[in-house]
Image: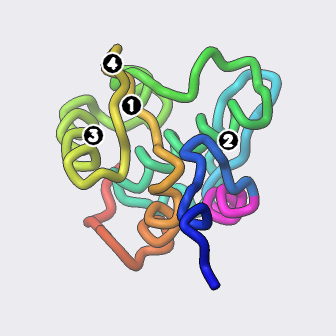
């Protein structure tokens, strides 16, 4: 029989296997430069998918103890890392935030909450929020 305590989870726990399965087709992580290296499949992602993949990659890099100061990123960092235009990134971040796929810290940086990783996996596999492919 289930106990009340069985409902308790930690929001900081990270399912590393799930993160790896989610990101593996689209990018690799460069430990030396703390950058992501997009694969060919990256180009098939929509703009919002690229943004969440990048933010999830940052979460993975922190979990792997890369020399990264924080998993959360400024909007300008998302623009630079994904190669998307700021006019595309800012509205996409607002939409992702409104849909609770990402969160925003007090210093206005964006990050993936652990509870959203399963949703992001579905999103990246194309079963949810599929948008028109743009660079």
Give the crowd class for mark 4: few <14, some 14-19, many >=20 residues within 10 Å: few
What residue is pinned by disc 4? 106
State how far apart marks 2 and 3 are (Cα): 19 Å
Q: Secondary structure at mark 4?
A: loop
Is residue 85 shown above or below 2?
above
Residue highlighted by disc 1: 110
Q: Tag 1's secondary structure? A: strand
Residue at image x 52%, y 58%?
117
What percent of the width, then of the height, locates residue 132?
26, 66
Tell me which residue sits at (61%, 79%) in the image: 2
Given contact means CB atoms under 8 Å apart, are the residues at marks 1 and 3 in contact? Answer: yes
Query: Magenta stretch: residue 41 in it?
Result: no
Q: CA distance from mark 4 to mark 3?
A: 15 Å
Look at the image and name its color scheme.
rainbow
Q: CA distance from mark 1 to mark 2?
A: 14 Å
**Tag in front: 4 or 3:** 4
| In-front residue for pair 127/107 | 107
- The first of marks 4 and 3 along the sequence is 3
Gap in Å between the C-alphas at discs 4 and 1? 10 Å
């Amino acid at each position: 029989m289930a106990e009340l305590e069985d409902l308790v989870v930690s929001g900081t726990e990270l399912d590393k296997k799930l993160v790896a399965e989610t990101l593996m087709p689209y990018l690799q992580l460069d430990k030396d430069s703390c950058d992501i290296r997009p694969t060919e499949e990256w180009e098939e992602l929509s703009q919002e998918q690229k943004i969440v993949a990048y933010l999830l990659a940052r979460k993975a890099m922190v979990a792997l103890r890369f020399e990264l100061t924080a998993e959360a990123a400024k909007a300008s960092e998302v623009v630079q890392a994904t190669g998307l235009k700021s006019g595309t990134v800012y509205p996409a971040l607002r939409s992702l935030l409104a849909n609770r796929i990402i969160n925003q810290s007090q210093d206005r940086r964006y990050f993936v909450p652990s509870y959203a990783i399963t949703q992001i996996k579905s999103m990246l596999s194309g079963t949810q929020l599929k948008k028109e492919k743009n660079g």
